[in-house]
Image (cartoon, helix red, strand yellow):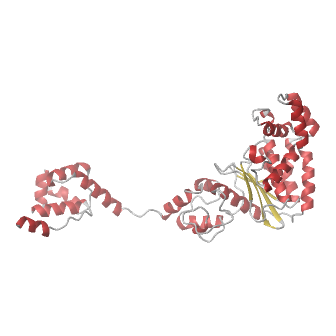
């Protein structure tokens, strides 16, 4: 009965720290600090910092104490780790903010590109991100955890959405004449004269500016597979953004003409026409392609190489297409062989043909264009 009474009245163990455990076990045994030091074979002064909580319990001391007090050494290890964690300072609030944002958006890349300041942290980081997406709070940024606001952009993947907003930032600061549809239609017709020479792509930014179209080239974010976009700042201010994801003359002209058709048709006024992976079937006019995209694809195909002419060429030459045939047909159409090669690849689903003709145009157009990426940062505020 006496043993049972002692068990009931025994003070509960407080595992807040290793020192609490040691003092509890010493009290049970009626040991003094000197007694414990004697059992451990150390001086009393050497264990004083442990008992006062000024020094932690090392693995070696945990094993020694376990032997002396007949308890598990793991108990000391767990208590020591928990005690140190409780004593540690709270993390920089920026850690939580960065983790929350990086889980959805390529924040590091956005900082590297100058879209968000690299030294932004905590509240400042959240403020900048809200400014970037033009919202009042982080809860309104699409895709972030606990986002409370559903917007017209909710169907756009995060990396593409960030790219779209960067194009928007650049476009709104571009002084451009009022858009006149008839003037753009005439400009598109004049562009046909540029198809034969890659060097003539340098005229595109000026021609679009004069037609009232804001044009920006923004490098796509990793994994976004973005090609282009058409949207409107207002009814007199259409915007075309391109990523030049594929630096090829055929892709440049196809994507550009695709976006121009969106503008001419008035597409994108109620929501951005964002074009990603604009290639193969997605660049076609099949039933699985959305109506507005079929219209833009058809216009782009016809602009690059008229469908009837391409069909007739394929019917005559298939399945063998020689270099001589390609060059001769390109001269007749007054287009660069690379433009014809790109359309022929798509038509025949043979992307290994005539690849040497798919010349690059990025460095040609860059000097005259508003661009962001590839080591350059457009001079606009996020």
Q: Quadrant of the C terminus?
A: bottom right
Q: Residue furthest front?
A: 287
Q: Residue furthest bottom?
A: 136
Q: Is residue 8 above or below residue 258?
A: below
Residue at the spot 76% in from the left edge and 34% down from the top edge: 350
Tell me if residue 8 can be seen.
Answer: yes
Q: Left or right? Give the position of 238 relative to 141.
A: right
Tell me if residue 31 can be seen.
Answer: no
Residue at the spot 49% in from the left edge and 60% down from the top edge: 95
Q: Left or right? Give the position of 233 relative to 18.
A: right
> Residue 159, position in %: x, y?
64, 55
> Residue 152, position in %: x, y?
69, 65
Q: Quadrant of residue 139?
A: bottom right
Q: Left or right? Give the position of 354 relative to 329.
A: left
> Residue 7, position in %: x, y?
12, 65
Residue at the spot 78% in from the left edge and 32% down from the top edge: 353
Looking at the rendered structure, the number of numbered marks drawn on it comes to: 0
Q: Is residue 367 above or below residue 127?
A: above
Q: Quadrant of the N terminus?
A: bottom left
């Amino acid at each position: 009965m006496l043993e049972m009474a002692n068990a009931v009245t025994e003070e509960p163990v407080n595992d807040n720290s290793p020192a609490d455990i040691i003092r509890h076990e010493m009290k049970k045994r009626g040991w003094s600090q000197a007694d414990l030091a004697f059992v451990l074979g150390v001086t009393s002064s050497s264990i004083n910092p442990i008992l006062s909580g000024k020094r932690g319990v090392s693995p070696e001391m945990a094993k020694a104490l376990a032997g002396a007090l007949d308890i598990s050494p793991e108990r000391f290890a767990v208590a020591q780790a928990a005690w140190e964690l409780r004593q540690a300072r709270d993390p920089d609030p920026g850690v939580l903010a960065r983790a929350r944002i990086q889980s959805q958006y390529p924040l590091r890349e956005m900082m590297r590109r100058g879209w968000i300041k690299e030294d932004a942290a905590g509240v400042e980081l959240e403020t900048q991100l809200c400014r970037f997406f033009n919202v009042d709070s982080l809860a309104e940024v699409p895709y972030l955890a606990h986002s409370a606001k559903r917007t017209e952009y909710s169907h756009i993947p995060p990396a593409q959405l960030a790219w779209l907003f960067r194009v928007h930032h650049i476009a709104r600061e571009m002084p451009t004449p009022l858009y006149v549809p008839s003037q753009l239609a005439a400009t598109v017709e004049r562009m046909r004269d540029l198809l034969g020479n890659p060097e003539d792509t340098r005229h595109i930014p000026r021609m679009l500016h004069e037609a009232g179209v804001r044009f920006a080239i923004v490098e796509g974010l990793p994994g976004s597979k973005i090609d282009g976009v058409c949207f409107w700042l207002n009814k007199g201010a259409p915007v075309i953004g391109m990523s030049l994801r594929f630096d090829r003359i055929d892709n440049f002209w196809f994507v550009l003409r695709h976006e121009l058709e969106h503008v001419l048709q008035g597409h994108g006024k109620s929501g951005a026409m964002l074009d990603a992976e604009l290639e193969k079937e997605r660049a076609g006019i099949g039933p699985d392609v959305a109506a507005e995209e079929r219209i833009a694809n058809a216009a782009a195909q016809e602009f690059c190489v008229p469908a009837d002419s391409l069909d007739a060429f394929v019917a005559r030459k298939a399945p063998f297409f020689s270099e001589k045939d390609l060059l001769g047909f390109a001269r007749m159409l007054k287009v660069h062989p690379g433009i014809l090669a790109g359309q022929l690849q798509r038509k025949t689903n043979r992307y290994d043909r005539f690849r040497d003709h798919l010349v690059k145009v990025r460095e040609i157009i860059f000097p005259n264009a508003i661009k962001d990426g590839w080591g350059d940062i457009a001079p606009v505020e996020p």
